[in-house]
């Protein structure tokens, strides 16, 4: 007996959809599990649909099956669109950079050691239009601008 049936019985009502059957030991009398019957029916339906789509062009099949898929988060189309900075006075003078993408995703980095934010901003032209998922490619294009001490602050901020 399910919890909903127990509750209905407690308040004196009966569920009209479910008819109580006497318990029998015969396996032929036991109804099939609804989950299994659902899986069997869906498998047969999938086979039937596969046969129907077999003779249609693949472009139409892909267009039909992906027509309601949102494409806002396609990682292959992700591009860096902007880099901005702000200066905080948390520990002396610290510049925080923000790298924005065309899909609304952004990343934050700290220009280390109180270095000037211009060290990071000079890398903006190098990273615009690149996919931020290609971390190694971006780092290879900016690592030559990282130098000793505070000069490497911009590269560290972009890398973060």
Image (cartoon, rainbow, N blue to C red):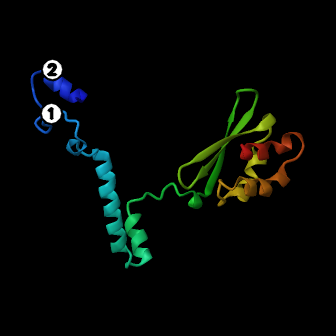
Q: Nearer the viewer, mark 2 or mark 1?
A: 1
Q: Position of residue 94 (x, y in %)?
A: 73, 34
* Label 2 or label 1, whichever comes before in sequence order: 2
Which residue is denoted by mark 2 in the rendering? 10
At mark 1, the secondary structure is loop
In the image, residue 55 sits, relative to residue 92, either above or below, namely: below
Please tell me which residue is depicted at 29% across the width and 57% down the height of the picture. 41
In the image, residue 80 sits, relative to residue 53, either above or below, namely: above
At mark 2, the secondary structure is helix
Please tell me which residue is depicted at 35% across the width and 63% down the height of the picture. 46
Q: Position of residue 57 (x, y in %)?
A: 41, 78
Q: Which mark is residue 22?
A: 1
Can you say which quadrant of the picture contains the C terminus?
top right
Label 1: how many residues lie within 10 Å, few (<14), some (14-19) or many (20+)? few
Which of these two is toward me, 22 or 20? 22
Work out which residue is located at the far top of the displayed protein and give it.
10
Q: Position of residue 66 (x, y in %)?
A: 41, 63
Work out which residue is located at the far right of the displayed protein and give it.
148
Q: Position of residue 43 (x, y in %)?
A: 35, 59
């Amino acid at each position: 007996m399910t919890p909903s049936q127990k509750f209905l019985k407690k308040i004196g009502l009966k569920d009209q959809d479910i008819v109580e059957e006497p318990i029998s030991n015969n396996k032929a009398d036991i109804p099939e599990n609804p989950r299994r019957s659902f899986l069997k029916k869906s498998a047969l339906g999938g086979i039937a649909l596969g046969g129907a789509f077999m003779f249609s062009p693949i472009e139409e099949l892909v267009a039909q099956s992906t027509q309601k898929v949102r494409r806002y988060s396609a990682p292959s189309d992700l591009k860096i669109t902007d880099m901005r900075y702000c200066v905080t006075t948390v520990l002396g003078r610290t510049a925080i950079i923000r790298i924005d993408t065309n899909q609304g995703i952004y990343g934050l980095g700290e220009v280390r050691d109180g270095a000037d934010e211009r060290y990071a901003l000079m890398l903006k032209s190098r990273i615009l239009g690149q996919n931020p998922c290609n971390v190694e490619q971006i780092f290879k294009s900016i690592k030559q601008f990282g130098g000793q001490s505070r000069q490497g602050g911009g590269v560290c901020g972009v890398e973060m």
